[in-house]
Image (spheres, coloured by chain):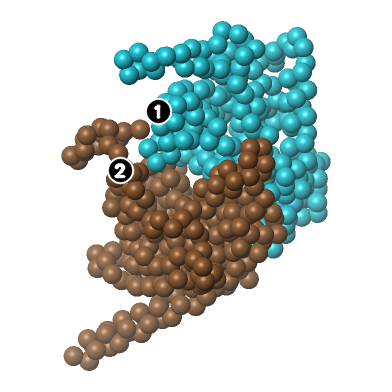
Amino acid sequence: MVDINLSEAEKRYIIDGVKLGIRADGRGPLDYRELELETGVLDTANGSARVRLHRTDVLVTVKMELEPPAPARPNHGKLLFFVNYSGNAAPEFEGRGGDELAARLSGVLERLYSDANAFNTAGLVLVPGKYVKAFYVDVEVLECGGNLFDVVSVGVKAALYATRTPSITITGEDGGELEFNLSDNPYDVDRLDVVNAPVLITHLRVSEGATVVDPSIEEEQCAPVSVVVGVAPNSSICAVHLLGPGTIGPQTLQKALKGSSTLGADIHVRLLAKLKQEENFQGRRIRGFLG
Amino acid sequence: MSNRDPRRNCGPEKTTPIYVLKSPYPENNQFLQEDGKRNDKRSPLEIRKVYFGVSNISQAKGSSYVELGRTKVVCGVYGPKEIPPSNVFKSSGQVMCEVKVAPFSSFVRRSPVPDRQVKELSMQVKEALEAAIILDEYPKAQIDVFLTVVEDRGGVLGACVTAASLALCDADITMYDIVVGASTAWYNGQIYLDPSIEEEEYIATAAERQALCKGDGEVATASNGCLTVALMPLYANGQVATMVMSGSMTASQLQDGLDAALETCRKIYAIIKQVLLNRVKESDESSKAEQSE
């Protein structure tokens, strides 16, 4: 991804440190860096969230459209993911440069939310077979500071949680075309049920038997392969991907999977608590993109 | 999204595949038949019949043909060929991997232009191969791997990875080990090896059906999911090169299915070794016959 050139000695230092259980920034192998999260940063979207984890900065927006459903699934809404690596993050992402990586991330997100336990699209129907709600989730990667997948998954869950769409009623029919009425009342809104939506946890395989969670960009330069695990709030595993040109031993993989299960439940509890706290905060001043 | 491909005669813009009106799969809508066997008469831990062949494309440096049940994949390998000198000098070789899924490979016609799923498949196969090939032996060179999925009846990623490894061996590319792919599925807490496409699609919508039966707000507790894993069995005591899983289950259930899939990989590995040995013997005998003439 982003190129920061580490010398062989620096890589050795990081790898040997991880083998001893110490990381270059003093964290333990299962420690996350400080995460900043804010929802409602954009008025033009139905839901938005900005997440920052050290130098990784991601903006996620959710917009709803009314569309005919997919022909094979007339009673289901849609949830579609689009990822864009901004040229701000690295010069090589300018234009179509980041498309391959973006396709990867969108694929992972789609697989993560494909299960009905994570996100149920059955409740998003307006007129069965004719109009369903389609939620377009757009992810903009503003800066890449390591561990992109985790940050994006937290951002997606937060943005979906913060999504408010005006409630829609059908008022009549005029020559075969249905007439809709959107409620003017700002408190008459529909929300999405994302309590069970999963998040991703990235384990970087630094050496056999030693993986680290939430790799920094320096650590990512030292090892090619990482395991990305999607975990739901009830500790069940929803998705697993092995990313990068490298291999991992079955025992190390097993340890990473078990570890993610417990870590994931903890992350969900905290995330939901913070989202609820932010929601209930009266008169919240939106910090947005300042500082 | 309608991709109007200007090189082909596309049909009208708005078309509905007939399978929307009637599913191509049998109507019974049950995962298991009454006698506990699966819809294609297999037992839960039985894999489909496999076929591996090499050197089927005469023009390619190496090629292979793999059948997993009715899934058919062809692979051709070209190279190593020299990359034109550019400003970025790479001291190790490059792998270019392209998977193309034929429009007629599944019941609903697929666009000949690769969509996101197919591009992801290409990347996954590429990463598995980059781990297996000794790229340091091919500086400034590129190895091209072309895969064509002729028929997709389930287990496509595993078949592609296996086919690519076979073709690379046939092309005399040095590798650390052969990468073998296998897939597993979970349904209602039970493990099923080598799911067919009908089973994969059934499981993908399983959680919804269970949720409908239970009512809103309750999370379905039975485990459902699909997993594909690619293994290099002898390299460093067994190394996993690719893994993709989706669904919902506990870590221990996942572990059980993963172990079953890895065991399947090892069994297929033994068959592949035999196929390659036979090929070497064959070409040895034919070159001896030519010499004696």
Q: How would you rate the neighbour count of disc 2 (Cα within 10 Å): few for under 14, some for 14-19, many for 20 or more? A: few
Q: Which residue is mark 1?
A: A130
Query: What residue do we see at 64% from left, 23% from top?
Result: A162
Residue A33: x, y in percent? Answer: 75, 35
Q: Can residue A222 be seen by looking at this rendering? A: no
What separation in Å lies between label 2 and label 1 (alpha carbons)? 17 Å
Residue in the picture at 27% in, 84% down: B287
Instruction: Give the residue at mark 2.
Output: B17
Question: Left or right of B290: which side holds A4?
Answer: right
Q: How many marks?
A: 2
**Relative depth, front residue between B238 and A125:** A125
Q: Observer-nearest residue: B41 or A31?
A: B41
Residue A291: image quadrant is top right
User: Which residue type carries mark 2?
Assistant: Pro
Place of residue A224 in the rendered image (x, y in percent of width and height, measured from the top left): 59, 50
Q: Quadrant of residue A216?
A: top right
- Chain B painted colour: brown
Name the residue located 73 percent from the left edge and 20 percent from the top edge: A279
Q: Chain of mark 1?
A: A
Residue A276 visible in this rendered orientation of the protein: yes
**Tags 2 and 1 on a common chain:** no
Q: Residue at x 43, y 39 (%)?
A: A73
Q: Is residue B137 left or right of residue A19?
A: left
Q: Is residue B177 left or right of B223 when viewed as pictured?
A: left
